[in-house]
Amino acid sequence: MNPNRTETQTYPFPAEKLVAYEVAKEVLAEIARLSARWPAHLKDDAQRASLSVMLNVAEGASQPPRSGAKRRHYDIALASAGEVAATLDAAELLGRSPAGEVAAAKQRVGRLGALIAGLVRSCRPVGRR
């Protein structure tokens, strides 16, 4: 390897091929935007949960096919997506976000949940259908 040459080859991480990962990134960005007006504890919970979704989708994608670890990370991501939806409900009920903004964000979180549920189903043990 030539020390004067910049390395241009990159590794395509498995998560980068998943629609669920792209939607998780969108949800994280949306939560960051919406939660700017929320109480600190709700903001922290929402951002932590949306970050957990993204990171667990990524970690699950990098696990061996049909492994328990893969399914475990996707299960955690799905549970965290549910927590994100609940923080959106709380923000609306507390009057911290307008109903229209919450509805749009919940629709995206719902899509994310459906995508992750599909990833969970894809992790059935070998030999089971």
Image: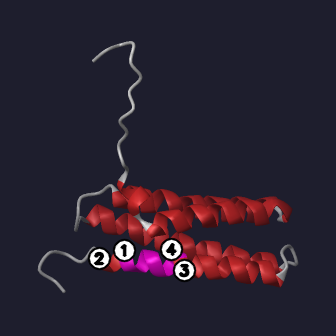
Q: Quick one: SS at disc 3?
A: helix
108 or 88: nearer the eye? 108
Residue 89 visible in the current orientation: no
State the image coordinates of residue 117 (x, y, percent, origin top left): 42, 79
Q: Quadrant of residue 50?
A: bottom right
Residue 126 visible in the current orientation: yes
CB under 8 Å between discs 1 and 4 = no
Inter-mark Cα distance, 3 to 2:
17 Å
Inter-mark Cα distance, 3 to 1:
13 Å
Q: Say what amino acid the circle numbered 3 marks.
A: Arg
The residue labelled by disc 1 is: 119
Foreground disc of the pair 2, 4:
2
Q: Say what amino acid the circle numbered 2 marks.
A: Ser
Magenta-tinted stretch: 112-119
Q: Say what amino acid the circle numbered 1 marks.
A: Leu
Foreground disc of the pair 1, 4:
1
Marking on residue 111: 3
Q: Quadrant of residue 104?
A: bottom right
Magenta stretch prevailing secondary structure: helix
The residue labelled by disc 4 is: 79
Q: Quick one: SS at disc 1?
A: helix
Magenta span contains residue 117: yes
